[in-house]
Image (tube, rainbow, N blue to C red):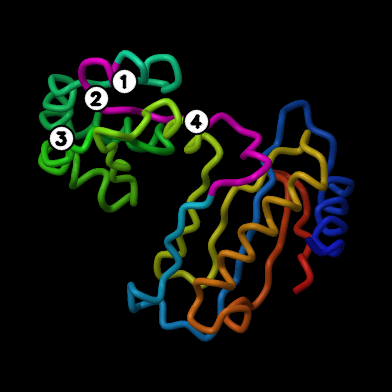
Amino acid sequence: MADTIVDAVSRALDEAPGRNFRETVDLAVNLRDLDLNDPSKRVDESIVLPSGTGQDTQIVVFATGETALRAEDVADEVLGPDELEDFGDDTDAAKDLADETDFFVAEAALMQDIGRYLGTVLGPRGKMPTPLQPDDDVVETVERMKNTVQLRSRDRRTFHTRVGADDMSSDEIAENIDVIVRRLEATLEKGPLNIDSIFVKTTMGPSVEVPA
């Protein structure tokens, strides 16, 4: 990991004015030389941050039986088929659920019903559930997703993602940023050449450029 990333994070943390609440640390990525009107050229990645997000991640699981019971220990909410059908009849409640939840996980057997009742709400938000196969461990899946962030550019040249919190160390946040940059360089059409600039900042603090 480059020392320049650590230095940029340290500056962002040091220059941020003191607040009486825990601030998120965000990364802003500016892309170039990409036709983002073409969906295949857009950034849409899920990344597990090695140092964690530093924030609470809201996760809802759609499940039944033993999987539902096990999920109750780790998920923020566990919903069954009956609740799922209720959301199909209440669009406002479905939108509230989607907006308040970072990630959804669902037993594979329920995915068809989720598409039917919640697809029009979750799909456009990029929040369709991660399917849970019969052999998958729901606890392990949810724990992993608590440390996951979404990189999603849609059709915009600039997009943002969470990389930590202001009470994390500069090294921890820099490690998260390093993983994100490496993923972008590996997945973008022209690699690093498609990255125009990257900035790191706390919620209320000034932006500091992360050198390439």
Q: Are marks 2 and 1 in contact (CB under 8 Å)?
A: yes
| Mark earlier in primary sequence (3, 1) | 1
Q: Nearer the viewer, residue 145 or 152?
A: 145
Q: Amino acid at mark 4?
A: Glu
Q: Is residue 212 left or right of residue 133?
A: right
Does residue 29 lie above or below 24 as drawn? below
Determine the CA span between mark 4 and mark 3. 21 Å
- Quadrant into which the C terminus falls: bottom right
Magenta span includes 66: yes
Q: Are marks 2 and 3 in contact (CB under 8 Å)?
A: no
Q: Which residue is mark 1?
A: 78
Mark sitting on residue 177: none
Q: Are marks 4 and 3 in contact (CB under 8 Å)?
A: no
Q: Are marks 4 and 2 in contact (CB under 8 Å)?
A: no
Q: Quadrant of residue 118?
A: top left
* Residue projecting furthest to the front: 135
Determine the CA span between mark 2 and mark 3. 9 Å
Mark 4: few, some, or many residues within 10 Å (few <14, many ≥20)?
some
Q: Nearer the viewer, mark 2 or mark 1?
A: 2
Determine the CA span between mark 4 and mark 1. 15 Å
Q: Which residue is mark 2?
A: 63
| Mark earlier in primary sequence (2, 1) | 2
Q: Which residue is mark 3?
A: 109
Determine the CA span between mark 3 and mark 1. 15 Å
Q: Amino acid at mark 1?
A: Val
Q: Tell me where residue 12 appears, x and y as whole percent.
A: 82, 52
SS state under label 1: strand
Magenta residues, as a range?
48-68
Q: Residue drawn 42% across and 25% down? A: 139
Q: Which residue is mark 4?
A: 143
Q: Is residue 136 left or right of residue 17?
A: left
Q: Nearer the viewer, residue 113 or 14?
A: 113
